[in-house]
Image (cartoon, rainbow, N blue to C red):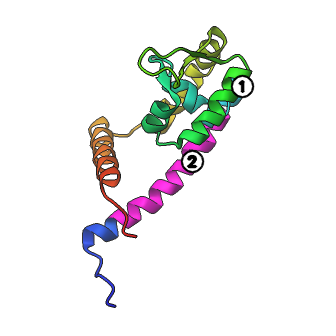
Amino acid sequence: MNEPQKTEAAKLLTEIVLLTFRLEGGFLAAADRISAPAGLTAARWKVLGAVLYEKRSVAEIGRVMGLTRQSVQRLADILVAEGIAAYEDNPAHRSAKLLVPTAEGRARIAKLSGRQTDWANRVSDGLDPTSLAAARDMLKTLIDRVEATEVPA
């Protein structure tokens, strides 16, 4: 069977995928360092951050953050056990509780907020905001296309 020829756009997309993997590693390492003084990890910060302004079910957090429901459930249970988050009844779905931050969870996020802002300011120093906005918009487009495109069996 003949292998399909990779288009120029597909070659560039493959480069973006590889760079994104490297970038994700850098972001997660930085997030771990930023969140450590607040007693959080990057993963716990991600889940807690997903409910900071809006109560969400575990499944909703997974969809918003691009995580599996099972990994979010494990992290949510840890956050609840540590008193950083709590479960509340979900009026829309009795069996799918909503995760909410506790006062302690909000305090921990507040503790790392300045550290994240300082880091983001230093990383973005000298970068053109218009270029960053274009990169953001392209990432959103790629996310939508990846989520809508089935992988061949």
Q: Which of marks 1 and 2 precedes in the sequence?
A: 2
Q: In which quarter of the image is residue 85?
A: top right
Q: In which quarter of the image is residue 15?
A: bottom left
Q: Which residue is drawn at 50% across and 20% down?
A: 94
> Three-letter amino acid code at disc 1?
Pro
Q: Position of residue 93 (x, y in %)?
A: 45, 22
**Horizontal side, residue 146 vs residue 38: left or right:** left
Q: Where is residue 123 in the image (x, y as percent from the top left)?
A: 49, 38
Image quadrant occupied by the N terminus = bottom left
Magenta stretch encompasses residue 23: yes
Residue span colored magenta: 13-34
When the figure is inspected, residue 124 is found, relative to residue 54, above or below; the finding is: below
- Residue 37 - label: 1
Front-most of 99 and 113? 99
Q: What element carries label 1?
A: helix
**Residue 127 visible in rendering:** yes
**Residue 124 visible in rendering:** no
When the figure is inspected, residue 1 is found, relative to residue 110, above or below; the finding is: below
When the figure is inspected, residue 45 is found, relative to residue 5, above or below; the finding is: above
**Horizontal side, residue 51 vs residue 41: left or right:** left
Q: Position of residue 57 (x, y in %)?
A: 49, 26
> Three-letter amino acid code at disc 2?
Gly
Front-most of 24 and 70? 70
Query: Magenta stretch mostly in which secondary structure?
Result: helix
Q: Label 2 belongs to which residue?
A: 26
Q: Is mark 2 on a helix, strand or loop?
A: helix
